[in-house]
Image (cartoon, rainbow, N blue to C red):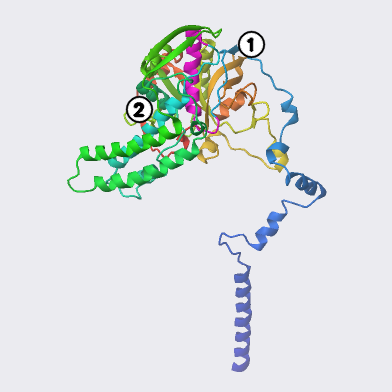
Amino acid sequence: MTKKYLALAIGAMLVCGGATAQKKKQAQPDYNGGITTEMMQQMKKGFGGSASDKALRNIMVNQSPQKLAMNYENATKFDSHFSNRVVSKAVTDQKSSGRCWMFTGMNVLRNQAIRKHHLPADFQFSQAYLFFYDQLEKSNLFLQAMIDTYKKPMNDQEVEWLFKNPIGDGGQFTGVANLIDKYGLVPADVMPETYNTNNTSSISNLIALKLREDGLQLREMAAQKGITPAKLQAKKTEMLGTIYRMLALTMGEPPAQFTWQQKNAKGEIVETATYTPKEFYEKFAKTDFSKYYMVMNDPTREYYKVYEIQYDRHVYDGQNWRYLNLPMEDIAPMCIASIKDSTMMYFSCDVGKFLNRDNGLMDMNNYDYESLMGTTFGMDKKQRVSTFASGSSHAMTLCAVDLDKDGKPLKWMVENSWGPNYGWQGNLIMTNDWFNEYMFRVVLEEKYIPANIRAMMDQKPVMLPAWDPMFAPEE
């Protein structure tokens, strides 16, 4: 072969090889994380455009998935019978506020007061009274935290969390206990609800705006050379005076003393007396809150351990929220014992999941989303909590259980605070399967807790950060 033809052959081979390499390079998929044309074509196969797909689409574009997924067969099985029930009184209504935690805690005390003192069934403690002090105490908690953390930079996670959450209307049982112990109680007719206690968002937003401004000022003052704790406290007190004025203008000023006519169950006046809020509490609802314990079912954390949440309190000089984490098989028997002894409990759950808002039934079989969407939703409780798909959102009063012949729970009932016309006569009913999946917290009196579990409460708690998503306040 001459050099000429050898060169041509080599050149042809290089061109051919280059073309092959180029083809191989072009054949490599582009994995840049975006949706490619090929991916789009593959995805479209999931919606084939068949007659049944089109018919389902035409229905679903005009209706909510929840309404269309309603399981008709399950709706016909509604049952309101309960083998064991604490007789509850008039259902309360928190209106457009996040005060479920307060209504729930006070409903537990209200039921006891009505029975013990033979009060009318519609008797209530004033939620407006306690909410006034809740907002004032939370304001102080935030401002004092600004002083305590002034050395930390603004982008510190704790400081950021404080500025994101200066105040709110949500809460939990520890707040009920600390506020009542400190300020007492008054009847609802002594300090009635106002527009702003029933509709809390506007005034809470204004107070939050003012607190953020004041928090910045306190941080700047605390960093000044030679500033004394006394001067910081004087400035904080001045700031709280503004918050007090805002609360008094929108909710009314809490009474320091009042005269009240006590009536019996028939509505007859049996006594007229003058009380301070602490005296009224001592007479009608005195409770040793140290005998109440919160237990929780959080499968993402180790069981039989006590946990405490930083800043999760309503009163700066009060207690953080603390609970013992237990499996459901330990929690249910204690709840049953309390109900059998006619004692209601503070209870919280992920209320919106599988809730039939027409009859108030919470059942895993209420909605068949899988058949409707042609897919599965298979996460368990631990996975839902870990991925932020579920968490405690609402507090209510656990008051009934229906037991089978072997003493096992079939279903439960809670007295809600959304008014008497919501759900079943103002109550919500949950199957035991739903209870296990979406119940998170319950507060029990010491006498219903077995000794071995009670002993676990004394261990040193594991401190969790305030921003842990599992511990958002109930609303």
- Kindly indicate the quadrant of the structure image that contains residue 77: top right
Q: Is residue 410 left or right of residue 68?
A: left
> Quick one: 160 or 77, which is closer to the camera?
160
Going by the picture, which residue comes out furthest to the right?
Answer: 51
**Residue at 78% from the left image edge and 52% from the top image edge:** 49
| 458 within the magenta span | no
Residue range in magenta is 95-119
Q: Say if 49 sits above or below 233 in the image.
A: below
Disc 2 marks a residue whose amino acid type is: Gln
* Image x and y of residue 83, in percent: 62, 12
* Image x and y of residue 29, in percent: 61, 64
* Image x and y of residue 253, in percent: 40, 28
> Quick one: 16 or 100, which is closer to the camera?
100
**Residue at 68% from the left image edge and 54% from the top image edge:** 43
Label 1 residue SS: loop
* Image x and y of residue 368, in percent: 70, 35
Q: Is residue 143 left or right of residue 18?
A: left
Q: What residue is pinned by disc 1?
A: 405
> Quick one: 192 or 18, which is closer to the camera?
192
Q: What residue is pinned by disc 2?
A: 319
Classify the position of the N terminus by image quarter.
bottom right
Disc 1 marks a residue whose amino acid type is: Lys
Q: Residues within 10 Å of mark 1 (few under 14, many from 20)?
A: few
Q: Which mark is residue 465?
A: none
Give the overall secondary structure of the magenta segment: helix
- Kindly indicate the quadrant of the structure image that contains residue 2: bottom right
